[in-house]
Image (cartoon, helix red, strand yellow):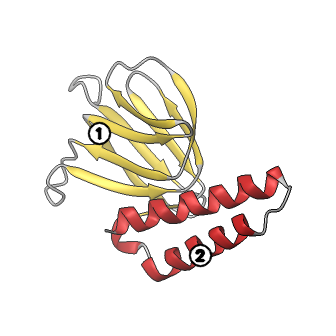
Amino acid sequence: MAEETNQLRVRLVTPERTLFDHPVTTVELPAKNGYMEALYGHAPLMTELGAGDVTLHGVTDGESGGVQRYNVSWGFAEVLPDRVTILASDALKPEEIDVSRAQEQLARGHKEWDEAGDSADAYTEALRVIAEAEAKIASAA
């Protein structure tokens, strides 16, 4: 059980699938306003996810060298002292990322930025698209 080993039980799910459901020692999350790290015993909190990598340390699957990464674009995370639940709108392993599609998304985001005019909402949406694309490209590298 996670409590006996001072590990967090991390569950990463999207509407389509469960990507990860195992104990780890540490999880790094791309919160809306920057990265955060959770360890066993963390104070309870909820956070909105931003675009970036969820990095899981202390994975004991024997294949990953103890670290696994997943790129997420948006969602929420619930952090409790003994578990973290990540509900992502989309999540991909680095090898699942189509870099050419991410580059097209980045170009589309820059085009939306250039055409935003006086609309603050259009700029916000363009920044979201750009951030997601840049995070995917960085994850795939």
Label 2: state its secondary structure: helix
Q: Residue furthest right?
A: 118
Q: Which mark is residue 23?
A: 1
Q: In front of the other: label 2 or label 1?
A: 2
Q: In screen coordinates, is 10 left or right of 14?
A: left
Please name the amino acid that badge 2 sits on.
Ala
The x, y position of residue 112, in whole percent, is 72, 68
The local secondary structure at tag 1 comes to strand
Look at 85% across and 55% down and name the residue there.
119
Q: Amino acid at mark 1?
A: Pro
- Between discs 2 and 1, the one toward the N terminus: 1
User: Callout 2: 10 Å neighbours few (<14), some, many (20+)?
Assistant: some
Image position of 24 (left or right of 109): left
Where residue 29 appears, x then y in whole percent?
Answer: 43, 41
Asked whether disc 2 touches disc 1, contact meaning CB atoms under 8 Å apart, the reply is: no
Name above or below for residue 132 compared with residue 58: below
Residue at point 17%, 49% (across, down): 66
x 58%, y 62%: residue: 130
Does 105 sit above or below residue 54? below
Which residue is most to the bottom?
100
Q: Is residue 26 left or right of residue 16?
A: left
Question: Residue 61: image x %, image y %?
Answer: 19, 54
Task: Residue at 79% x, 58% y: name it.
Answer: 122
Q: Which residue is mark 2?
A: 107
Q: Which mark is residue 50?
A: none
